[in-house]
Image (tube, rainbow, N blue to C red):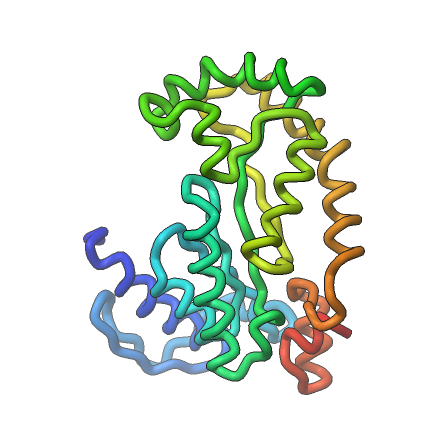
């Protein structure tokens, strides 16, 4: 497909997928693929409940709009961009989510990305990661490691520094439901990546889960799961209401 049609493809293809999950027989005609006549997609959604969808974007407001229109989740990559850009994208999604009647802006379902490199001692982390950073295609030959970590969510340091910076994302994105981390980046060897995963799972994730749960306002729902979507469908409530119950 022509990448210059990427947004149009995303909009049209998802509109079709949304129908295929919810209608047993679909007649459809669009711009980018052959028409469908009396088409039934298989397998059907588990328990008759379409899965919850996250629409991911780095810089395309059209994708934030798409997520808001359907009442789906919005995942902002939040890796190579400064906080003010992420703030604008998330605020756009939240405002449009409310505009389409899915709930308040605070009830919108948001996910963020981030990338980290950790060692027990922050100086060791900086010293070990710098040679990879300096030559990596997506990092190197531009801002210094110090500039990049100051201007973007990249965190290079101790597990405690990763925890503190990740918790600070709420200052500009609000309370959100999912945090993803880029761990295998900049050409790190497998052994190092596995060590990073151990640090993340043992020292970072448990604290983040506790802190996010402790400070989350009562009106901010959990991200929907299959169980909550199924429960909401049986009760005739919205996915977000089902997630809160």
Rendering quarter of residue 218: bottom right
Q: Where residue 23 appears, x then y in whole percent?
A: 47, 81
Q: Nearer the viewer, residue 148 or 119?
A: 148
| Whether residue 183 is situated above or below residue 52 in the rendered picture | above
Rendering quarter of residue 137: top left
Number of numbered labels in the structure image: 0
Residue for point 69% across, 77% down: 241
Image quadrant for the C terminus? bottom right
Residue for point 29% across, 61% down: 7
| Whether residue 32 is situated above or below residue 193 in the rendered picture | below
Residue for point 22% across, 59% down: 5
| Whether residue 143 is situated above or below residue 11 in the rendered picture | above
Q: Where residue 220 appears, x then y in whole percent?
A: 68, 68
| Whether residue 85 is situated above or below residue 53 in the rendered picture | above
Q: Where residue 35 appears, x then y in whole percent?
A: 25, 74
Determine whether, in the image, residue 164 is placed left or right of residue 116: right
Rendering quarter of residue 208: top right
Residue for point 65% across, 34% down: 162
């Amino acid at each position: 497909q022509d990448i210059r049609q990427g947004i149009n493809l995303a909009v049209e293809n998802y509109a079709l997928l949304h129908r295929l999950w919810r209608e047993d027989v679909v007649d459809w005609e669009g711009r980018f693929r052959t028409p469908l006549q009396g088409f039934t997609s298989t397998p059907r959604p588990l328990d008759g409940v379409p899965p919850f969808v996250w629409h991911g974007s780095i810089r395309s407001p059209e994708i934030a709009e798409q997520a808001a229109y359907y009442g789906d989740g919005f995942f902002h990559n939040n890796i190579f961009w400064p906080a003010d850009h992420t703030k604008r994208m998330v605020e756009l999604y939240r405002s449009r989510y409310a505009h389409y009647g899915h709930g308040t802006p605070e009830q919108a379902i948001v996910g963020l990305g981030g990338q980290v490199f950790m060692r027990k001692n922050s100086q060791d982390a900086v010293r070990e990661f710098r040679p990879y950073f300096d030559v990596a295609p997506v990092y190197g030959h531009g801002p210094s490691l110090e500039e990049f970590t100051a201007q973007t969510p990249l965190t290079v340091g101790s597990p405690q520094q990763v925890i503190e910076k990740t918790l600070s994302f709420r200052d500009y994105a609000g309370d959100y439901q999912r945090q993803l981390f880029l761990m295998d980046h900049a050409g790190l060897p497998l052994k190092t990546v596995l060590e990073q995963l151990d640090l993340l799972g043992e020292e970072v994730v448990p604290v983040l889960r506790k802190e996010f749960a402790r400070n989350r306002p009562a009106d901010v729902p959990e991200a929907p799961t299959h169980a909550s979507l199924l429960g909401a469908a049986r009760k005739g409530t919205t996915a977000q209401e089902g997630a809160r119950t």
